[in-house]
């Protein structure tokens, strides 16, 4: 059963950012800049998440997957920093 998923990212490198954007454009319903809404089943969401994780650097990049309406787990790759720049806050 498909559900709405939001992918958000903060990618340090322009080349990787363009790559992530291209991957998400194939799956998304709508989006802008670094936030994209997709309609995916749980298996499709996991597949897309793994594709995206392969393309980013865990030391500098951040990726967030949020299911709307609580249809699945919130997935996060990368570690939020305490500095105001790059701070990642998750709301459920």
Image (spheres, rainbow, N blue to C red):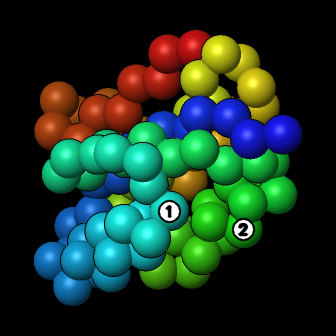
Q: Where is residue 49 in the image (x, y as percent from the top left)?
A: 62, 61
Residue 34 lies left or right of residue 70; in this view the side is: left
**Which residue does the image show at 18% across and 51% down from the upper left?**
33
Q: Position of residue 85 (x, y in %)?
A: 15, 39
How far is mark 1 from mark 2, CA to CA? 11 Å
Residue 60 visible in this rendered orientation of the protein = no
Where 25 falls versus 74 (above or below)?
below
Residue matched to label 2: 47
- Where disc 2 sits, the SS reads helix
**Which residue does the image show at 44% across and 70% down from the upper left?**
26
Mark 1 and mark 2 lie on one chain; the one further toward the N terminus is: 1
Determine crowd level at label 1: few under 14, some 14-19, many 20+ residues with C-alpha closer than 10 A.
Answer: some
Q: Which mark is residue 87?
A: none
All told, the count of numbered labels is 2
Comparing marks 1 and 2, which lies closer to the viewer?
A: 1
| Front-most of residues 43 and 1 | 1
Residue 27 lies left or right of residue 13; in this view the side is: right
Which quadrant: the N terminus? top right
Where 82 falls versus 61 (above or below)?
above
Residue matched to label 1: 27
Residue 48 lies left or right of residue 27; in this view the side is: right
**Which residue does the image show at 57% across and 38% down from the upper left?**
5
- Where disc 1 sits, the SS reads helix
Q: Where is residue 46 in the image (x, y as percent from the top left)?
A: 74, 59
Can you tell which quarter of the image residue 28 is in?
bottom left
Q: Where is residue 56 in the image (x, y as percent from the top left)?
A: 43, 74
Where 44 falls versus 92 (above or below)?
below
Can you tell which quarter of the image residue 50 is in?
bottom right
Determine crowd level at label 2: few under 14, some 14-19, many 20+ residues with C-alpha closer than 10 A.
Answer: few
């Amino acid at each position: 059963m498909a559900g709405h998923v939001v992918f958000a990212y903060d990618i340090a490198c322009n080349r990787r950012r363009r790559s992530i954007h291209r991957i998400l454009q194939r799956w998304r319903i709508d989006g802008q800049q670094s936030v994209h809404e997709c309609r995916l089943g749980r298996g499709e969401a996991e597949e897309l998440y793994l594709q995206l994780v392969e393309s980013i650097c865990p030391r500098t990049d951040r990726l967030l997957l949020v299911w709307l309406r609580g249809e699945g787990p919130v997935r996060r790759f990368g570690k939020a920093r305490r500095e105001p720049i790059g701070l990642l806050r998750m709301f459920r």
